[in-house]
Image: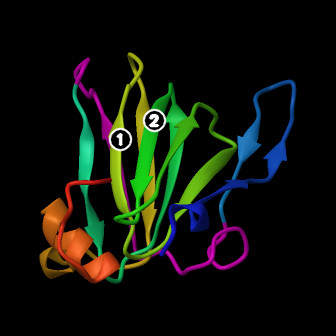
Amino acid sequence: MNPSLCKLIDLPKILDHRGNLTFVEATKHIPFEIKRIYYLYDVPGGASRGGHAHRNLQQFVIAANGSFDVITKDGTNKKKFFLNRSYYGLYIPTMIWREMDNFSSGSVCLVLASEFYDEEDYIRDYREFKKLAVGNKDDGQD
């Protein structure tokens, strides 16, 4: 997998003087059925989240409020995305390492996931991930 397979996807935006509306429909706006939804909030300044990859899970990450960075890696390449609007999100396929940082005050990170929670699906050690992703020993490069 290459982090360039991660992509920003625009969502429908219905503008109304009473307030705008955006929605997500599984398999129509994102390439998977949604089995789990979770959100991160009250992330302390300077903290980072993520720091793992998934063997089978796909994700769609939305900055529901505020902003944050998502850094994606495939063991060889690295790409950074800045999320700051609720009407688009970042699609992250399987076997992509992700880290999130630079959270603004009051930010809310909404995540739509293709699978139910399964600890066995997580790869939490970057060296192990890199061996699986690129098929060779870790040379210390990102």
Drawn side of residue 106 relative to residue 139, left or right: right
Residue 75 point in image, percent of width and height: 34, 65
- Horizontally, residue 111 falls left or right of residue 22, namely left
Q: Nearer the viewer, residue 102 or 111?
A: 102
Q: Which residues are magenta?
A: 25-46
Q: For mark 1, does the 10 Å Cα neighbourhood hold few (<14), some (14 to 19), or many (20 or more) residues? A: some
The residue positioned 48% from the left and 72% from the top of the image is 93
Q: Looking at numbered disc 2 in the image, what kind of residue is underneath it? A: Asp
On residue 100, the disc is 1
Do the residues bearing badges 2 and 1 touch, measured as CB atoms within 8 Å? yes
Q: Which mark is residue 69?
A: 2
Density class for disc 2 (Cα within 10 Å; few <14, some 14-19, many ≥20) is some
Disc 2 secondary structure class: strand
**Residue 110: x, y in percent?**
44, 48
Displayed quadrant of residue 4 = bottom right
Among the two numbered marks 2 and 1 on one chain, the one whose residue lies closer to the N terminus: 2
Residue 42: image tag? none
> Which residue appears at 64% of the width and 70% of the height?
30
Q: Nearer the viewer, residue 21 or 128?
A: 128
Instruction: Tell me: 141 left or right of 124.
Output: right
Residue 34, given in percent of the width and then of the height, sits at 49, 74
Element at badge 1? strand
The answer to whether residue 124 shows anywhere in this view is no
Q: CA distance from mark 2 to mark 1?
A: 6 Å
The number of numbered badges drawn on the structure is: 2
Q: Residue at x 21, y 76 (%)?
A: 131
For this orientation, the residue located farthest to the front is 139
Q: Amino acid at mark 1?
A: Met
**Main secondary structure of the magenta stretch:** loop
- Magenta includes 33? yes
Query: Which quarter of the figure has residue 53?
Result: bottom left
Q: Percent x, y for residue 83?
A: 56, 37
